[in-house]
Image: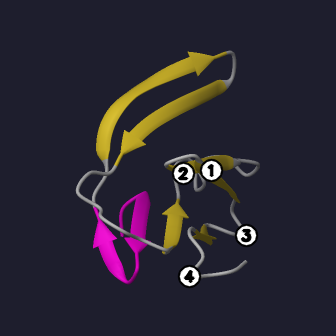
């Protein structure tokens, strides 16, 4: 498994690198996923720097139209699930 993995409705998807921005001790990485039609549930794994820094915290934000969902990943919780649309509930 790589540093990041995204599974939407049980299908694995690849990220496209958009860019990054560095602010003090924070690095914002911008990634996008194309060619996803309707989706409801996503499982996100984010391992960037988790093995390198004991206190690493990765914030993952996903947008679908006007809805935004956010996850926080760290050494004890590298994966999380987000839900969109009325098909699923938290």
Magenta highlight on residue 76: no
Label 1 sits on residue: 68
Q: Quadrant of residue 31?
A: top left
What residue is shown at x 65% (from left), y 27% (from top)?
Answer: 26
Residue 7 location (% of width, % of height): 40, 73
Q: Nearer the viewer, mark 1 or mark 3?
A: 1
What residue is shown at x 36% (from left), y 68% (from top)?
Answer: 38
Q: State the separation of the CA atoms marked 4 and 3.
A: 29 Å
Q: State the separation of the CA atoms marked 4 and 2.
A: 17 Å
Label 4 sits on residue: 87
Q: Is residue 52 above or below residue 74?
A: above
Left or right, residue 38 beside residue 41: left
Considering the numbered disc 4 on the image, is that residue within a helix, a strand or a loop?
loop
Residues at marks 2 and 1 touching, judged by CB atoms closer than 8 Å: yes
**Quick one: label 2, few (<14), some, or many (20+) residues within 10 Å?**
some
Considering the numbered disc 3 on the image, is that residue within a helix, a strand or a loop?
loop
- Sequence order check, earlier mark of 2 and 3: 2
Most frequent secondary structure within the magenta stretch:
strand
- Sequence order check, earlier mark of 1 and 4: 1
**Quick one: label 1, few (<14), some, or many (20+) residues within 10 Å?**
few
């Amino acid at each position: 498994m790589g540093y990041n993995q995204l599974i939407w409705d049980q299908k694995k998807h690849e990220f496209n690198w958009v860019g990054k921005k560095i602010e003090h001790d924070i690095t914002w990485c911008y990634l996008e996923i194309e060619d996803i039609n309707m989706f409801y549930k996503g499982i996100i794994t984010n391992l960037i720097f988790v093995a390198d820094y004991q206190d690493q915290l990765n914030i993952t934000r996903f947008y679908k139209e006007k809805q935004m969902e956010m996850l926080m990943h760290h050494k004890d919780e590298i994966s999380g699930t987000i839900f969109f649309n009325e098909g699923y509930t938290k």
